[in-house]
Amino acid sequence: MGALRDVPRTVWLLACGTFANMVVSVSFAFTFLYLTGPRGLDAGQAGLLSGIGGVGLVAGNFTGGWYGDRFGHRRVLLVAAAVSGLVLAAVPFVPTPALFAALPVTQYASGVQRAANSALVAVIVPEGARRQAFAVVRAAANGGFTIGPVLGAVVATELSYDWLYVAEGVASVGFACWTARVVPARGRAGRPGAARGDGGNGGVWAALRARPAVVVLLVAILVVDVVYRQQYSTFPMFLDDHGMNARVYGTLLAVNGGVLLCLELPAALALRRVPPLRVVGAGLLLVGAGYGVLLSGVGIGTAVVMMGLLTIGELLYKTTATAYVADQAPEHVQGRFQSLYAGVSISGVVLAAPAGGAVYEAAPGVLWPLCAGAGVLAGGAVLAVGTRRRASAPTSPTAPALVPLPTAPTQVPTDGEGPTDGADPGPPAARDQLRSARK
């Protein structure tokens, strides 16, 4: 647990704000019921509006980091959280036709906020401590969401669905105010891009071409997210078709949330010295194996094992992959790298249901083998590129070991707004050793 001391105080404070925000950020879970109930839309209209909102969420994730690299990640997070909150709080008061604009706007702003938040953590935390930092933030989010839906159901049934949107809107604006208070507007940071020889030149595509392992990882995450999110679309249909009702499904989701809440942070700490691509690859394989279990038969036992494997796979790959992308990103495109990861890691929100539903309707027996195979291929690709990177690493016994250059003090974070100072060159011994190694 001593590794948690490497997580800057600012990240802990951000995590506290994330927890409070997630407790009330549950309106999306009740949107379909709200649209078909108090708003009087039919299922087709509600599905269309929900789909448009999902597209907005994915688009926000893909673009939030680009805004952050240009305008500052802190500034973008504050604006996105405020916009999302103000529009959400106004949802109960806008006419029903206007929801086709209001809800996608809130989803887009939420996506931008999510990407900006990841990029902000990436620039605050020095390389080497990012796995545990992202795990702290995810644990806070999971903890808040474990409580949120229960409270949301009480509010919706005892008061009104309108209060869900008002409460979430107020909380989002409050999160913006909290972030403005706990994250300084400017600071110092090392220059990971310069240290890797990028020199701040070139755009995101040039940086990706120089890092093929990141490209493989992004494609693998895109594939697995479509597979992973079948648990929210076709999997409950599968359970219902085999006589297991919504109560069984809800219990399985509770198992997922409880395991993540209890084990994700300890797992990140225990595995922080294991090569990241090995951890990510193993997690993706477990997601594929989870759906593979369904091929052995249908029952409560197989469903529980399936959900357990998916959950362990998730806690292995999600935090580690986020930190790996942050560690590989040159400083001048840190936000765009985080946006690419955030976008592919949530693309299943849009792609999973239509793709899985079409396959399940046409050939129900084919869906789970496809999911298992896709997970195994994605995990195998990440493991293979990780092995290739380790094999190609220089191992000359005559080369002197380099003392890593110390990063800038973590207690004075940067938010990506304004210029950063260069990395501290380190003590004289480290500089002399570095000079002799270069000779």
Image (spheres, rainbow, N blue to C red):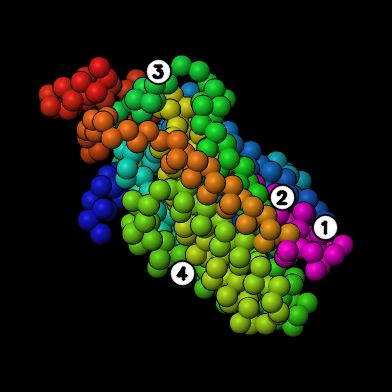
What residue is pinned by disc 3?
199
Q: Residue at x 64, y 72 (%)?
A: 293
The amino acid marked with disc number 2 is: Leu
Compare residues 70 and 29 and report the one nearer the observer. 70
Q: Is residue 144 visible?
A: no
Q: Nearer the viewer, residue 358 or 61?
A: 358
Residue holding disc 4: 259
Q: Which residues are magenta?
A: 343-369
Find out whether residue 365 is within the magenta segment: yes
Residue bearing the label numbered 1: 358
Q: Can see residue 195?
A: yes
Proximity of marks 4 and 2: CB atoms separated by less than 8 Å: no
* Label ID, residue 351: 2
Secondary structure of residue under mark 1: helix
Q: In the rendered image of this protein, does residue 373 appear above or below residue 300? A: above
Q: Quadrant of residue 357?
A: bottom right
Task: Work out whether mark 1 precedes mark 2 in sequence or the reverse, and give the earlier one.
Answer: 2
Question: Against 313, is 67 above or below?
Answer: above
Instruction: Determine the secondary structure under disc 4.
Output: helix
Comparing marks 2 and 3, which lies closer to the viewer? 3
Q: Nearer the viewer, mark 3 or mark 4?
A: 3
Left or right of 1 in this view: 170: right
Between 357 and 366, the one nearer to me in the picture: 366
* Residue type (three-letter) at the residue carrying disc 4: Val
Q: Determine the CA span between mark 2 and mark 3.
A: 37 Å
